[in-house]
Image (cartoon, grey):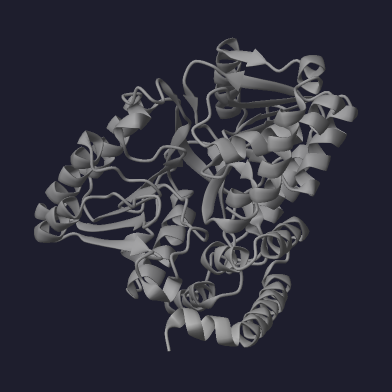
Amino acid sequence: MSVSDFIFRFWQDITGWLALFYSLLTIGTLCWVLHTKRETMSAIAWSLTVLMLPLIGACLFFVFGAQSITRPLTRKQQKKSAYKKISGGVDEKPSADVPARWDNLAKLGHHGDGFPVTGGNAVTLYHEGHRAFEAMLEAIQSARNHVHMQFFIFRSDASGERFIDALCDCVRRGVEVRFLYDSVGSYNLSSRLLRKLAQAGGRSAAFLPILNPLYRFRVNLRNHRKILVVDGRVGFTGGLNIGDEYLGLDPRFGPWRDTHLRVEGEGVRGLQRVFLEDWHFATEEAVHGDRYSPTFDKSPGSALVQVVHSGPDGEYKAVRETYFAGILNARKRVWIASPYFVPDAGLKDALVLAAWSGVDVRLLGLFRPDKWLPFLAARFYWTDILAAGVKVYQYTAGMMHSKFVLVDGEWASIGTANMDNRSLLLNFEVNYQLFDEALIAELEQHFHIDLKSSIRVDANVFSERPFISRLAENASRLLSPIL
């Protein structure tokens, strides 16, 4: 009997079994969605996807969405707890004194497994890639004990070669080198560079490898952190990854505007700890001891700083909560730079309330997007914040990749986290809270410079945009929790 004859003879039975299979698959997937997705918008978006795209919706959820309570996340939580026991727990000493008005921000940053505010730090800010890269390479070249490096994106171009060569030179001098990269962000990282580092004696590892069937090609739960720690004394973090585009050398992006910082002092301990927990998860190597957390006989500077980290492996989202509380604390101004702006309902309401109460709220974002989905989703949220009086600017001089929140010239949060749901809920991020008016004045100065290279969105003109634009923005907003 041929296949066509079989189908013709038993088509009713085949149809019945397919209908039963589809029903069971849909019901089972919907139950899975409701069990794993705690965010209302994400649960609704995935439920609609499953219902409106038969079979395809379930497959999309299996590949992209089933990531909140899964084996890799559970394993990350277990490894985090195990590392705490091995290394002696988190730093429980009290935070250094901060101005009373910002004490709640210090407590939020220290809550759970957070780190205290530390004083006596020397902080240098970088506003473009060239000076930041040179400072990082100089720190690597001066290493005596160890270099710990972690980036979301690491290119195999001239910039990547320079950093790998610097790491290899360190190893030859007897310096320990550990290099952690995200397997999705650095998907095209050349195995040649990794072999080069390994042959020199350095170690490297991928965070949640996407080719491992255990993780089912996961594109969420990514490690978006950018960390460099040298000898436990000097640390770098911020928006810069490693690649030629971050030096403004890629014509597709043009000049690259970013914000990075160098910290020297006790404030590096938290950054070191974040790296070592991620390294332990990726490699099973539990690195700890006094040599990785040195003491300082003399304070290198006077800045008050605090490391704030968060990720999907914890219920408490410290970066998000400090953003939220910082906005609510504002009395004069809230200035935000973020290339991707997809806030949750609470953050959007906080911005709206701040603007309604007379606070000068400004948002600086992209004019020419590198990713259309978050760009269109951001425009959906512009409607409400523009109506409340928030000033929205689009940077036209190139790629604006800075990530910071400035409040009243007294408090700032700067680091790797965008003001969007992916950064604040789905990715691993790290920021510094700054309680230093001189540093914040420098950030505000550069924010003013950026505004001169930006166009302000006219609320009246924006409200009259075509229906098709509104439709695309709403669709992107619904898809943003999914992809």
The single residue placed furthest to the right in the displayed view is 357
In this orientation, which residue lies closer to the viewer: 304 or 403?
403
Does 282 sit above or below residue 294?
A: below
Which quadrant holds residue 31? bottom right
In this orientation, which residue lies closer to the viewer: 53 or 313?
53
Q: Is residue 237 left or right of residue 165?
A: right
Does 266 sit above or below residue 47?
A: above
The single residue placed furthest to the top in the displayed view is 452
Q: In which quarter of the image is the N terminus?
A: bottom left
Horizontal and vertical percent position of residue 412: 63, 36
Horizontal and vertical percent position of residue 38: 73, 66
Q: Which residue appears at 60% of the width and 74% of the height? A: 69
Q: In this view, does 402 lie to the left or right of 53?
A: left
Q: Is residue 434 visible?
A: no
Horizontal and vertical percent position of residue 240: 41, 37
Which quadrant holds residue 70? bottom right
Does 250 sit above or below residue 6?
A: above
Q: Can residue 232 be seen in this view?
A: yes
Does 44 sit above or below residue 240?
A: below
Number of numbered discs on residues: 0
Q: Which residue appears at 55% of the width and 28% of the height? A: 439
In this orientation, which residue lies closer to the viewer: 469 or 19?
19
Horizontal and vertical percent position of residue 327: 76, 38
Q: Which residue appears at 58% of the width and 49% of the height? A: 423
